[in-house]
Amino acid sequence: MKKFENKVVAITGGGSGLGKLSCEMFAAEGATVCVIDINAQTAGAVAESIVSAGGKAKAFAADITNESAMEKLFAEIHDTYGRLDVLFNNAGISPIGTVTTTSYADFRKVLAIDMESIFLGCKYAIPYMEKQGGGVILNTVGTFGLKPIPNKVGYACAKAGAMSLTRSVAIDFARSNIRCNAICPGFVDTPLNKDFTGEAREKFLDSYQPMTLKIQPEDIAKTALFLASDDARAITGQAVVIDGGTEACLYY
């Protein structure tokens, strides 16, 4: 039996990048996947591809920063499937800037997408999980939520808040059999980093990451599969770092 047979898994940002790959890998393990994205077309394409490959998936278009949209989204998922076993809050943006170069509007935007959407997802998914006796929540936080780097103030603040949210949810709902963990990737080959290529990228990795391997989206998605499974039943409230050793050292 596949690990996620008869399980319903909802993934935000499922229309591209790590979200798309995660949707495909959860579906390959038997999950019914809810592909959530603000772009209905890309979400639909991912869901159709999964179904064509013999899996189970449905696209859900939603603005994850809109409270009424999120409330409606999880009600629709529950009405459709009668349960929700895993919520992977994966969607996010990664702007650059300091407090002086970042506009207040852009600062609020990254907080809304990278942190507040996690609050909304948890707020409206957890009641359904409680009714069914438990569930799993995963939040993509990233290493800059643990230790910021220069010129990433909005992203680092949002992800630090997301990490705190993860821990609060974990301790508040542990007795409801709901686990909540943060996935913290280092530098990964995803569309989020598509503009950072060539010699500059190679020099950055050489001075930034102790391991020489290039971390791939598959490495992150496999971590999500593990944390969402019963194999990780005793793990909650944790920041699980996948960064080739970067966060472990002061500098390299």
Image (tube, rainbow, N blue to C red):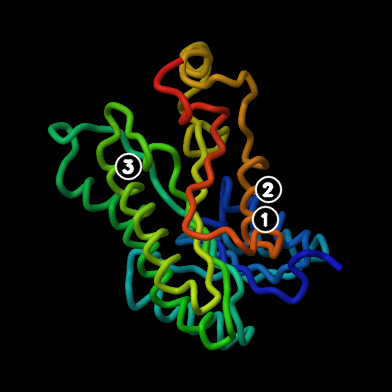
Give the camera-side residue of 216 and 93. Answer: 216
Which numbered disc, 2 or 3, marks the residue that appears first in the sequence? 3
Mark 3 lies on residue: 155
**Considering only vertical position in the picture, is 184 above or below 61?**
above
Could you tell me the amino acid type at mark 1? Leu
Give the camera-side residue of 68 and 207. Answer: 207
Graded by Cα atoms within 10 Å as few (under 14), some (14 to 19) or many (20 or more), the crowding at tag 2 reads some
The quadrant holding residue 9 is: bottom right
- Label 1 sits on a secondary structure element that is helix
In what quadrant of the picture does the N terminus appear? Answer: bottom right
For marks 3 and 1, give the one nearer the viewer.
Answer: 1
Q: Are marks 2 and 1 in contact (CB under 8 Å)?
A: yes
Percent across and percent down for residue 229 are 68, 62
Residue 110's label in the rendered image is none
The mark total stands at 3
Q: Residue at x 61, y 83 (%)?
A: 83
Q: Residue at x 53, y 88 (%)?
A: 131
Q: Are marks 3 and 1 in contact (CB under 8 Å)?
A: no
Could you tell me the amino acid type at mark 2? Lys
Graded by Cα atoms within 10 Å as few (under 14), some (14 to 19) or many (20 or more), the crowding at tag 3 reads many
Residue 225's label in the rendered image is 1
Q: Residue at x 55, y 80 (%)?
A: 77
**Considering only vertical position in the picture, is 33 above or below 175?**
above
How far apart are labels 2 and 1 at the CA level?
Answer: 5 Å
Give the camera-side residue of 111 and 148. Answer: 148
Give the camera-side residue of 132 and 121. Answer: 132
Could you tell me the amino acid type at mark 3? Tyr
Mark 2 lies on residue: 222
How far apart are labels 2 and 3 at the CA level?
Answer: 24 Å
223 to the left or right of 98? right
